[in-house]
Amino acid sequence: LSAIGVGPISDSKSAFLARNAATSCSLITVRDNESFKILQKLKIKKAIKVSDPVFIFGKDPMPSTKRKDVIGVCPVFQTDHPENFNQQLKSLAKLLDNTIDRLGVKVCFLPFQYGFEECNDIVVSKKIIDLMKNKKKTEIRIIDTKEKAFSAFMNIKFVIGIRLHSMILSTITNTPFFGLSYDLKCSSFLKDIGMEKYSCKIEDLENTEKVKQVFFRTY
């Protein structure tokens, strides 16, 4: 298993299944400290910690000399807690409207995943835009190659990252970002790079004022 995230493992049955799966591997590489600690706790000795493979791509192409007044948003279709999903989208739309009004920026949605017909990042992006009052100051940009992804991140001012690799690309390209963690792998990465106090969990979107405070402090 290569460059995986592990957890959360919250009960003995999950621990048993994870241990059995891990023991059938000759080597496991994990990309964050929390995953490594979980495997250690399960007494899996053939695990090593590595960087996410995206880090090997480097900075190519080079950024423009001046970044545009654009905030990138990398959403994710949240299926773990569907009962809260619509409220989270409304709160994110409200935050983006507030940001446009306050900072005079445009918002560019950068969907990473388009594979599933009814629950992909393009669908989520459109849902958020539908909930916004500043619809004309938004766009959706398809980034279907490595070059397009790096170019997009290098030429925008700030990122609201929900997907893990939006946080990683922001880090590689020195693009300031605000992390909204929807999964342990995101929280672990944010902790590893010292960004915990400049981020929130996705469920915090239900408290719009808290998220707004952390976001503008980070920006």
Image: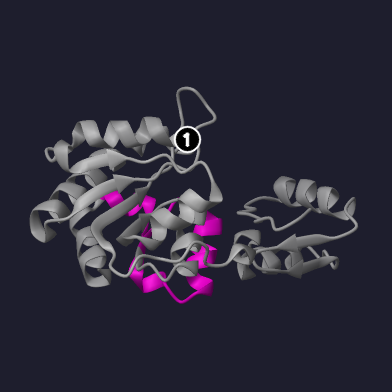
Q: Residue beneath label 1, please?
A: 79
Work out whether residue 213 or residue 109 is closer to the camera in this orientation and state it.
109
Q: Is residue 142 above or below residue 95?
A: above
- Towards the viewer: 109 or 199: 109
Q: Is residue 180 visible?
A: no
- Answer whether residue 186 is magenta in the image: yes
Report the quarter where the C terminus lies. bottom left
Q: What x and y, as percent, mark residue 158?
A: 30, 62
* Model colouring: one colour
Task: Let me know if residue 80 is in the magenta part.
Answer: no
In the depicted view, which residue is nearer to us: 53 or 131? Answer: 53
Q: What is the three-letter code of the residue carrying label 1?
A: Thr
Question: How dense is the environment of label 1, judged by Cα within 10 Å: few (below 14), some, or many (20 and up)?
Answer: few
Q: Is residue 136 left or right of residue 140?
A: left
| Residue furthest top in the image | 117
Confirm whether residue 143 shows in the render.
yes
Residue 175 relative to residue 165: left or right: left
State the SS at label 1.
Answer: loop
> What residue span does the magenta drawing correspond to?
178-206
Residue 98 located left or right of residue 202: left
The residue located at (40%, 66%) in the rendering is 63
Q: How many numbered marks, from 0 up?
A: 1
The image quadrant that residue 69 belongs to is bottom left
The spot of residue 33 in percent (x, y) is: 63, 70
For residue 134, what is the image quadrant?
top left
Residue 128: x percent and y percent?
A: 27, 37
